[in-house]
Image (cartoon, rainbow, N blue to C red):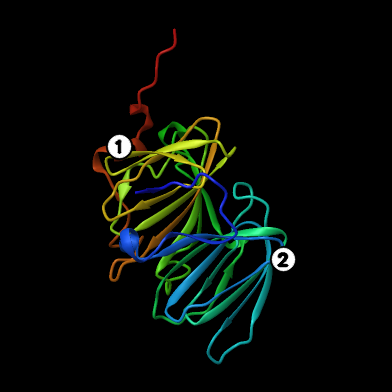
Amino acid sequence: MQIPHKVPFCRGYTPLVTRSGATADMLMDFGVLSLLPGECWEQASETDEQCFLLARGSAGITWMVHSAGPGPVNADVSRTDLFDHGPWCLSVPKRTRVVIQAGPEGAEWFYTATDNPRRFTAKLYTPEECRSEFRGEGTMRETSTRIVRTIFDDTNRSESNLVIGEVIGLPGKWSSYPPHHHPQPEIYHYRFLPGQGFGLTAIGDTPYIIRDKDTILIREGEVHPQVTAPGYAMWYLWVIRHLEGAHYGSATDTPIFIDKHTWVIGDEQKIWQPKRD
Protein backbone atom coordinates (compact mmCIF):
# COMPACT_ATOMS: atom_id res chain seq x y z
CA MET A 1 0.00 0.00 0.00
CA GLN A 2 1.31 3.43 -0.95
CA ILE A 3 0.50 6.71 0.83
CA PRO A 4 1.63 9.53 -1.50
CA HIS A 5 2.45 13.00 -0.20
CA LYS A 6 3.44 15.59 -2.81
CA VAL A 7 3.59 18.84 -0.82
CA PRO A 8 5.49 19.98 2.29
CA PHE A 9 4.09 18.75 5.57
CA CYS A 10 1.91 21.31 7.28
CA ARG A 11 2.68 22.83 10.66
CA GLY A 12 2.09 20.46 13.56
CA TYR A 13 1.51 16.73 13.37
CA THR A 14 0.46 14.98 10.15
CA PRO A 15 -0.74 11.40 10.79
CA LEU A 16 0.11 8.98 8.00
CA VAL A 17 -0.59 5.62 9.64
CA THR A 18 -3.04 4.97 12.48
CA ARG A 19 -4.20 1.92 14.41
CA SER A 20 -7.70 2.23 13.00
CA GLY A 21 -9.43 1.89 9.66
CA ALA A 22 -7.47 0.68 6.63
CA THR A 23 -4.11 0.75 8.41
CA ALA A 24 -5.13 -0.85 11.72
CA ASP A 25 -3.24 -4.06 10.91
CA MET A 26 0.05 -2.14 10.90
CA LEU A 27 -0.23 -1.99 14.74
CA MET A 28 1.56 1.39 14.78
CA ASP A 29 0.85 5.09 14.61
CA PHE A 30 3.24 6.97 12.35
CA GLY A 31 3.46 10.56 11.17
CA VAL A 32 5.51 13.69 10.64
CA LEU A 33 5.82 16.51 13.18
CA SER A 34 6.80 19.91 11.72
CA LEU A 35 7.61 22.72 14.14
CA LEU A 36 8.29 26.39 13.38
CA PRO A 37 11.25 28.16 15.03
CA GLY A 38 10.67 28.30 18.79
CA GLU A 39 7.45 26.30 18.63
CA CYS A 40 6.79 23.79 21.43
CA TRP A 41 5.16 20.35 21.24
CA GLU A 42 4.18 18.05 24.11
CA GLN A 43 3.23 14.37 23.86
CA ALA A 44 2.46 11.60 26.38
CA SER A 45 0.66 8.27 26.44
CA GLU A 46 -0.67 6.04 29.19
CA THR A 47 -0.38 2.88 27.06
CA ASP A 48 2.14 3.39 24.25
CA GLU A 49 5.86 3.42 23.84
CA GLN A 50 6.85 6.33 21.62
CA CYS A 51 9.75 7.05 19.31
CA PHE A 52 10.85 10.49 18.04
CA LEU A 53 13.45 10.60 15.26
CA LEU A 54 14.88 13.96 14.18
CA ALA A 55 14.75 14.54 10.42
CA ARG A 56 16.17 18.06 10.23
CA GLY A 57 16.65 21.25 12.22
CA SER A 58 17.40 21.65 15.90
CA ALA A 59 15.49 21.35 19.15
CA GLY A 60 15.68 21.11 22.89
CA ILE A 61 13.94 18.01 24.22
CA THR A 62 12.85 17.09 27.74
CA TRP A 63 11.41 13.80 28.93
CA MET A 64 10.15 12.63 32.29
CA VAL A 65 8.35 9.52 33.53
CA HIS A 66 4.94 10.31 35.02
CA SER A 67 5.40 8.17 38.13
CA ALA A 68 7.95 8.67 40.85
CA GLY A 69 11.50 8.36 39.61
CA PRO A 70 14.34 10.45 38.23
CA GLY A 71 13.60 14.06 37.38
CA PRO A 72 13.38 15.47 33.86
CA VAL A 73 16.19 14.85 31.40
CA ASN A 74 17.15 17.52 28.87
CA ALA A 75 19.13 17.41 25.65
CA ASP A 76 19.85 19.62 22.65
CA VAL A 77 19.88 17.93 19.25
CA SER A 78 20.46 19.06 15.67
CA ARG A 79 20.63 17.51 12.22
CA THR A 80 21.47 19.29 9.00
CA ASP A 81 20.15 16.62 6.63
CA LEU A 82 19.22 12.94 6.43
CA PHE A 83 21.91 11.80 4.01
CA ASP A 84 25.21 12.99 5.45
CA HIS A 85 24.35 13.13 9.16
CA GLY A 86 23.35 10.29 11.48
CA PRO A 87 20.11 10.14 13.47
CA TRP A 88 19.10 11.36 16.90
CA CYS A 89 16.25 9.16 18.16
CA LEU A 90 14.40 9.29 21.48
CA SER A 91 12.68 6.07 22.65
CA VAL A 92 10.42 6.29 25.70
CA PRO A 93 8.07 3.87 27.50
CA LYS A 94 4.43 4.49 28.35
CA ARG A 95 3.60 7.21 30.91
CA THR A 96 6.48 9.39 29.77
CA ARG A 97 5.94 13.03 28.92
CA VAL A 98 8.06 14.39 26.07
CA VAL A 99 8.41 18.13 25.38
CA ILE A 100 10.10 19.35 22.20
CA GLN A 101 10.99 23.00 21.57
CA ALA A 102 12.22 23.77 18.08
CA GLY A 103 15.40 25.75 17.61
CA PRO A 104 15.94 28.80 15.37
CA GLU A 105 15.73 26.72 12.16
CA GLY A 106 12.57 24.93 13.20
CA ALA A 107 12.52 21.13 13.34
CA GLU A 108 10.96 18.14 11.63
CA TRP A 109 10.49 14.80 13.40
CA PHE A 110 9.22 11.33 12.52
CA TYR A 111 6.93 9.95 15.21
CA THR A 112 6.03 6.30 15.87
CA ALA A 113 3.94 4.81 18.68
CA THR A 114 2.68 1.34 19.54
CA ASP A 115 1.18 -0.35 22.58
CA ASN A 116 3.69 -1.77 25.05
CA PRO A 117 2.90 -2.65 28.69
CA ARG A 118 6.58 -3.03 29.64
CA ARG A 119 8.39 -0.46 31.72
CA PHE A 120 11.89 0.39 30.56
CA THR A 121 14.31 3.28 30.71
CA ALA A 122 13.88 6.11 28.23
CA LYS A 123 16.94 6.55 26.01
CA LEU A 124 18.18 9.12 23.52
CA TYR A 125 20.18 7.37 20.79
CA THR A 126 22.98 9.53 19.40
CA PRO A 127 24.43 9.47 15.87
CA GLU A 128 27.59 7.88 17.27
CA GLU A 129 25.59 4.97 18.74
CA CYS A 130 23.87 4.16 15.45
CA ARG A 131 25.23 1.05 13.71
CA SER A 132 26.03 2.01 10.13
CA GLU A 133 27.19 -0.41 7.44
CA PHE A 134 27.59 -0.67 3.68
CA ARG A 135 25.34 -3.67 3.31
CA GLY A 136 25.73 -5.76 0.16
CA GLU A 137 29.25 -4.47 -0.37
CA GLY A 138 31.45 -6.90 -2.26
CA THR A 139 28.54 -8.90 -3.70
CA MET A 140 26.30 -8.77 -6.77
CA ARG A 141 28.91 -6.61 -8.56
CA GLU A 142 27.98 -3.77 -6.16
CA THR A 143 24.50 -3.47 -7.67
CA SER A 144 22.85 -3.71 -4.25
CA THR A 145 25.30 -1.80 -2.07
CA ARG A 146 23.46 0.57 0.28
CA ILE A 147 23.99 2.24 3.65
CA VAL A 148 21.98 0.69 6.49
CA ARG A 149 21.77 2.50 9.82
CA THR A 150 20.21 0.44 12.61
CA ILE A 151 19.20 2.64 15.54
CA PHE A 152 17.78 -0.04 17.79
CA ASP A 153 16.59 -3.62 17.58
CA ASP A 154 16.53 -6.62 19.92
CA THR A 155 20.30 -6.43 20.46
CA ASN A 156 20.16 -3.03 22.18
CA ARG A 157 16.44 -2.47 22.93
CA SER A 158 14.92 -5.87 23.69
CA GLU A 159 12.12 -4.31 25.78
CA SER A 160 10.76 -2.39 22.80
CA ASN A 161 8.05 -3.61 20.45
CA LEU A 162 9.77 -1.73 17.61
CA VAL A 163 12.81 -1.97 15.39
CA ILE A 164 13.88 1.27 13.73
CA GLY A 165 16.56 2.35 11.31
CA GLU A 166 17.41 4.19 8.11
CA VAL A 167 18.62 3.15 4.65
CA ILE A 168 20.29 5.24 1.98
CA GLY A 169 19.80 3.73 -1.44
CA LEU A 170 22.77 4.70 -3.64
CA PRO A 171 22.05 6.08 -7.12
CA GLY A 172 21.05 3.34 -9.54
CA LYS A 173 21.34 0.54 -6.96
CA TRP A 174 18.91 -1.85 -5.27
CA SER A 175 18.04 -2.26 -1.61
CA SER A 176 15.88 -4.71 0.37
CA TYR A 177 17.64 -7.23 -1.82
CA PRO A 178 17.68 -10.18 -2.40
CA PRO A 179 13.87 -10.05 -2.24
CA HIS A 180 12.58 -11.09 1.16
CA HIS A 181 9.55 -10.99 3.41
CA HIS A 182 8.62 -11.40 7.08
CA PRO A 183 5.42 -11.70 9.11
CA GLN A 184 5.91 -8.42 10.98
CA PRO A 185 4.35 -5.21 9.59
CA GLU A 186 6.83 -2.60 8.35
CA ILE A 187 6.61 1.09 7.39
CA TYR A 188 8.92 2.80 4.87
CA HIS A 189 8.99 6.60 4.56
CA TYR A 190 11.05 8.16 1.75
CA ARG A 191 13.07 11.27 0.95
CA PHE A 192 15.21 11.93 -2.15
CA LEU A 193 18.32 13.95 -2.98
CA PRO A 194 17.69 15.99 -5.09
CA GLY A 195 14.05 16.18 -4.10
CA GLN A 196 12.65 15.48 -7.58
CA GLY A 197 14.21 12.02 -7.52
CA PHE A 198 12.33 8.76 -7.61
CA GLY A 199 12.65 5.03 -7.16
CA LEU A 200 10.59 1.92 -7.73
CA THR A 201 9.43 -0.90 -5.52
CA ALA A 202 7.29 -4.00 -5.84
CA ILE A 203 5.17 -4.84 -2.81
CA GLY A 204 4.14 -8.39 -3.49
CA ASP A 205 3.18 -8.31 -7.18
CA THR A 206 2.19 -4.62 -7.20
CA PRO A 207 4.71 -2.08 -8.56
CA TYR A 208 4.92 1.49 -7.25
CA ILE A 209 6.84 4.59 -8.31
CA ILE A 210 8.24 6.09 -5.10
CA ARG A 211 8.63 9.86 -4.77
CA ASP A 212 9.77 12.28 -2.09
CA LYS A 213 7.68 12.09 1.13
CA ASP A 214 5.82 8.93 0.07
CA THR A 215 5.10 6.18 2.59
CA ILE A 216 4.87 2.46 1.84
CA LEU A 217 3.13 -0.10 4.08
CA ILE A 218 4.40 -3.68 4.04
CA ARG A 219 2.15 -6.35 5.45
CA GLU A 220 2.66 -9.98 6.42
CA GLY A 221 4.40 -12.02 3.75
CA GLU A 222 4.75 -9.20 1.21
CA VAL A 223 8.05 -9.27 -0.67
CA HIS A 224 9.52 -5.75 -1.02
CA PRO A 225 12.64 -5.18 -3.17
CA GLN A 226 13.31 -1.64 -4.43
CA VAL A 227 15.67 0.33 -6.64
CA THR A 228 16.86 3.93 -6.77
CA ALA A 229 16.86 5.86 -10.05
CA PRO A 230 20.33 6.74 -11.43
CA GLY A 231 21.55 10.17 -10.36
CA TYR A 232 19.50 10.28 -7.16
CA ALA A 233 19.97 9.14 -3.57
CA MET A 234 16.98 7.59 -1.80
CA TRP A 235 16.73 7.81 1.99
CA TYR A 236 14.06 5.89 3.81
CA LEU A 237 13.08 5.32 7.40
CA TRP A 238 12.09 1.75 8.25
CA VAL A 239 10.06 0.80 11.31
CA ILE A 240 9.08 -2.78 12.11
CA ARG A 241 6.55 -3.85 14.75
CA HIS A 242 7.48 -7.05 16.61
CA LEU A 243 4.71 -9.61 16.96
CA GLU A 244 3.93 -11.50 20.14
CA GLY A 245 6.20 -14.53 20.14
CA ALA A 246 7.78 -13.49 16.82
CA HIS A 247 10.39 -10.79 17.19
CA TYR A 248 11.89 -9.57 13.94
CA GLY A 249 15.48 -10.71 13.52
CA SER A 250 15.32 -13.39 16.21
CA ALA A 251 17.12 -16.69 15.64
CA THR A 252 13.84 -18.40 14.77
CA ASP A 253 12.39 -15.58 12.69
CA THR A 254 14.95 -13.90 10.47
CA PRO A 255 13.92 -12.24 7.19
CA ILE A 256 12.85 -14.92 4.72
CA PHE A 257 14.65 -14.63 1.38
CA ILE A 258 13.07 -15.87 -1.84
CA ASP A 259 15.03 -19.04 -2.61
CA LYS A 260 15.24 -18.61 -6.38
CA HIS A 261 17.05 -15.27 -5.97
CA THR A 262 19.51 -16.08 -3.17
CA TRP A 263 22.14 -17.31 -5.65
CA VAL A 264 23.01 -13.68 -6.45
CA ILE A 265 24.87 -13.25 -3.16
CA GLY A 266 27.12 -16.21 -3.93
CA ASP A 267 29.54 -16.54 -6.85
CA GLU A 268 29.13 -13.30 -8.77
CA GLN A 269 30.95 -14.84 -11.73
CA LYS A 270 27.58 -16.40 -12.52
CA ILE A 271 26.09 -12.95 -13.05
CA TRP A 272 25.99 -12.23 -16.77
CA GLN A 273 28.20 -9.43 -18.12
CA PRO A 274 28.23 -8.14 -21.69
CA LYS A 275 31.25 -8.93 -23.83
CA ARG A 276 33.18 -6.00 -25.17
CA ASP A 277 34.59 -6.15 -28.68
Going 40% across and 13% down the picture, which residue do you hit? 275
Mark 2 — residue? Answer: 38
Q: Residue at x 49, y 82 (%)?
A: 95
Task: Please tell me how crowded label 2 is: few (under 14), some (14-19), or many (20+) other residues with Cα within 10 Å.
Answer: some
* Relative side of 178 to 166, left or right: left
Q: Is residue 26 above or below residue 218?
A: below
N-terminal of the two: label 1 or label 2?
2
Residue at the top extreme, as displayed: 277
Q: Which residue is mark 1?
A: 263
Assign a secondary structure to mark 2.
loop
Q: Amino acid at mark 2?
A: Gly
Between 167 and 37, the one nearer to me in the picture: 37
Location of residue 82 in the rendering, given as x and y in whole percent from the top left corner? 60, 50
Residue 118 position by quadrant? bottom left
Spatial distance from mark 1 to mark 2, Cα to Cα? 53 Å
Within 10 angstroms of label 1, few (less than 14), some, or many (20 or more) residues?
Answer: some
Please state if 14 lies on the left or on the right of 264 as rendered. Answer: right
Viewer-proximal residue, 260 or 99?
A: 99
Q: Quick check: 148 above or below 108?
A: above
Q: Residue flagged by tag 1: what amino acid is it? A: Trp
